[in-house]
Image: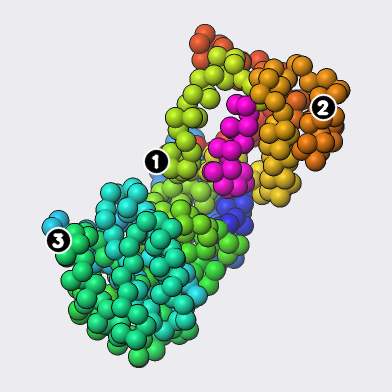
Amino acid sequence: MAFESLTNRLSKALKNITGKGKLTEANMNEMLREVRMSLLEADVNYRVVKDFIEHVKIKAMGVEVMSSLNPGQMVVKIVHDEIVELLGTQEQGLNYKTAGITTVMMVGLQGTGKTTAAAKIANVIRKKQSRKPLLVACDLIRPAAVEQLKTLGASIDVEVFSLGIETPALTTAKKALEYAQEQGYDTVIFDTAGRLHIDEELMQELADIKAAVHPDDILLTVDAMTGQDIVNVAQSFHDQLAVTGLVLTKLDGDARGGGVLSVRAITQVPVKFVGLGEKIDDLDIFYPERMADRILGMGDIMTLVEQAQDKMDMEVSQKSAKRMMSGQFTLEDMLEQFRQLKKMGSLGGMMKLIPGMSQMAGKIDEAKTDKQMKMFEAIILSMTKEERQNPDILKASRKNRIAAGSGTKVSDINQLINRYEKTKVAMKQMGAMANGGKMPNMKGMAGSKPKKNKFRTRRF
């Protein structure tokens, strides 16, 4: 994911300063040099880096910080707060009208994921904000853009308005507003045409549509992979259209992420939505403080909880959890765990959202883990109901039958049973702790003694 290298370097720089018993100008300057180099290598704009370092230094060298009991942690908080300041201090939602139809124009260059982002935003506001959106196909330049939007709209149960590629985009936009009024839609999202580069013809078409629909929001889609070009593109569109927000796409890629940290500071256009994958659900409202937490390796528990609520069957999960905590943990429960985890996405992606676990996320072999989970699932599905409920009856003959039915080996079945037994012990001890207030005995829960985390990151 973007920021991975930046996260690692910043964590190292801040870890060094938190290990100092006393702050001095010398060790402070050493830390600031590391932070400066980290930001520059992440492709953050030089002027933004210069201002950022100056602000941190002024606050960090203050009397209150230098004389505090834990000056290192105070510095971490200052760096965290300055990153939040760069990103926008608070989330910026859509500018909904108090009455009438809210109109949103999607603009951007070709290849930035504009059409997909339009559908993803419609999906977010329909599911999370109870809006009734209408998508409008005004991108008549790119081949198949209209059909792509219709396909995406059908997948999220959102209607797409189109008059075909022969009708001018401006006419389509005007007719769409009339249709939305008749059908009772409260939000209309216009997917406009893009170009490979900014030109006069593109801007004139966008200006004409803007004059006709009077958008409450003009959202510019920018690709996180393009680095500092994000700033140049955003500034050009903003100068000519007065952009009200940015939609960042492909933030799950291996981009250095510096453009994201630079764009708001330079253009003063807030990031409103962020895309973290290709699936239709992989876009959400942008929360600056949560992103700052993730950049500093502090995790993002709120996002993890929201993803669980959105993607997991909470009723099934709660029933399963209650059974496990009471010691009634079967292979059927384990199968349900695997299925719920798959809905959440990659294990590495989830670990990055857990405080203190981001460093370990990159060490996970996602392909190997996914393959093993599928193998375990096949093994359990090859068992009878009695075998899933009572694995103790799994003797040699039964294991041979299950291995043949699932296309695995008896050693794979033994590995699953071993994992199951350890999980069962862990759940039983957690249940005992919850009921009696005692700490669980860690021995045997994971096969090894957990290591103490030397650098414990705090939330502020």
Mark 3 lies on a secondary structure that is loop
**Which comes before the other along the chain, label 1 or label 2?**
1
Kind of residue at disc 1:
Glu
Q: Is residue 398 magenta?
A: no
- Name which residue lies at 14% across and 61% down: 100
Q: Identify the residue at horizontal 48%, vertical 64% (top origin).
A: 249
Q: Is residue 455 above or below residue 210?
A: above
Q: What percent of the width, then of the height, locates residue 268?
A: 33, 67
Q: Is residue 460 left or right of residue 396?
A: left
Q: Examine the image and state in which quarter residue 178 appears.
A: bottom left
Q: Label 1, on which residue?
A: 64
| Amino acid at the residue labelled 3 | Gly
Q: Nearer the viewer, mark 1 or mark 3?
A: 3
**Is residue 344 one of those drawn in magenta?**
yes
The residue carrying mark 3 is 100
Q: Name the quadrant of the C terminus.
A: top left
Give the main secondary structure of the magenta stretch. helix
User: In screen coordinates, is 161 left or right of 417?
Assistant: left
Q: x, y percentage for residue 60? A: 45, 49
Which one is nearer the viewer's eye here, 151 or 241?
151
Point out the image quarter for the N terminus. Answer: bottom right
